Image (cartoon, rainbow, N blue to C red):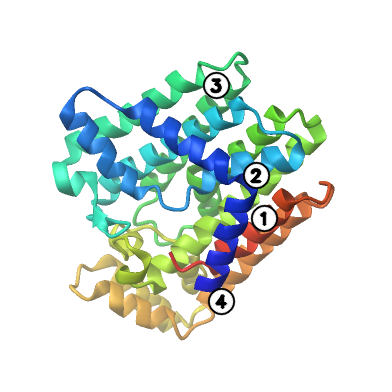
Amino acid sequence: MRDSAAGLLAAVADCIGPELAAVDRLFHLELSSGIKCVDALVKHVSRFRGKMLRPMLVLLTGKACGKLTDAHITIATVVEMVHMATLVHDDVLDEAELRRKGATINHLRGNEAAVLLGDYLISHSYHLCSSLDSQRASRAIARTTNQVCEGELLQIDNRNNLDLDEKTYTQIITHKTAVLCAACCELGASLAGAPASTVSRMEKFGLCLGIAFQIQDDILDILGHTSQVGKTLGIDIEKGKMTLPMIHFMKNAPHEHQELLRSLLSGHEPDQVEKIRNLILPSDSIEYARQQARQYTQQARKALADLPASPARDVLDAMADFVICRTL
């Protein structure tokens, strides 16, 4: 896995390395503050940026569909700001203490600072987006952030709903995760001057990729180890969030096992997460979730079929495999 991740990162660097570096510079330039406490918080949250998946999608899609422009750099920076804001707010909602092996803002400075920092990131993203001549990007980013909020509200509304169905689960993760990936690809293609049909296919690529990414994230919340994944795990279980492996288990496991899972999810035992993990692991529910993620990546790759051969297209294709094989 490390070899495949290293290979993908090397391919990304070869394809869009200078442009990613430009995004990084613009991110720090835009968010620099003369107020020391604000600057310190921004520097701390910058540690969470990790893979820069969403800026990669903007740039790779743009390059696969045409030529990259300064507008691509701007939008790639905007989506990174939006993503960082969602992470900061998610950590407040989840009461998470760890992200990328570092203390979360809410754990370090409290919920008030974390909420305001998330707002600060969002407001900066809109300010930067408004610098573009066209309003298409601003409207797309605004629509997408609204959808992300809808997904989070829908998830909160279904906390402790042990009978959550797969359709509603998919609606939740589509809104809270996949729509931002879709917007990245849509804007990357449109800013490169791609025809409407290509823009639509790239939006589909991003949407399917984002759904697969979130399913894998939910699998890792059950299977992963904090030292490897680098963030607080078991939060979905502790917060009463039904994810795909648990939904499948609740529907298909023997009745006595379903009842045991209900009992464990309703309780607050110190070893609750470990007991649920040990209950689900011998079943085929994890493999079912993996298979669903694979199906979404297959749909994503089909959306690339009509793009001309190029290194950027090859990297996008490789990313579809990476999102469901990753361990962090």
Question: Helix, strand, or loop for circle 3?
Answer: helix
Q: CA distance from mark 1 to mark 4?
A: 26 Å
221 above or below 48? below
Tag 4 residue: 287
Of residues 238 and 60, which is closer to you in this image? 60
Dividing the picture into quarters, in which one does residue 39 lie? top left
Query: Which amino acid, by three-letter code, is at mark 2?
Result: Leu
Mark 1 or 3 closer to N-term?
3
Query: Which amino acid, by three-letter code, is at mark 3?
Result: Ser
Q: Nearer the viewer, mark 1 or mark 4?
A: 1
Of residues 188 and 243, which is closer to you in this image? 188
**Residue 34 shows in the view:** yes
- Furthest-bottom residue in this view: 282
Mark 1 or 4 closer to N-term?
4
Q: Nearer the viewer, mark 1 or mark 3?
A: 1
Tag 3 residue: 138
Query: Which amino acid, by three-letter code, is at mark 1?
Result: Val
Where residue 251 appears, as percent x and y from the top left, is 51, 71
Position of residue 77 in the picture relative to residue 8 (left or right)? left
Question: Helix, strand, or loop for circle 4?
Answer: helix
Q: Are marks 1 and 4 in contact (CB under 8 Å)?
A: no
Q: Residue at x 68, y 37 (%)?
A: 62
Question: Helix, strand, or loop for circle 2?
Answer: helix
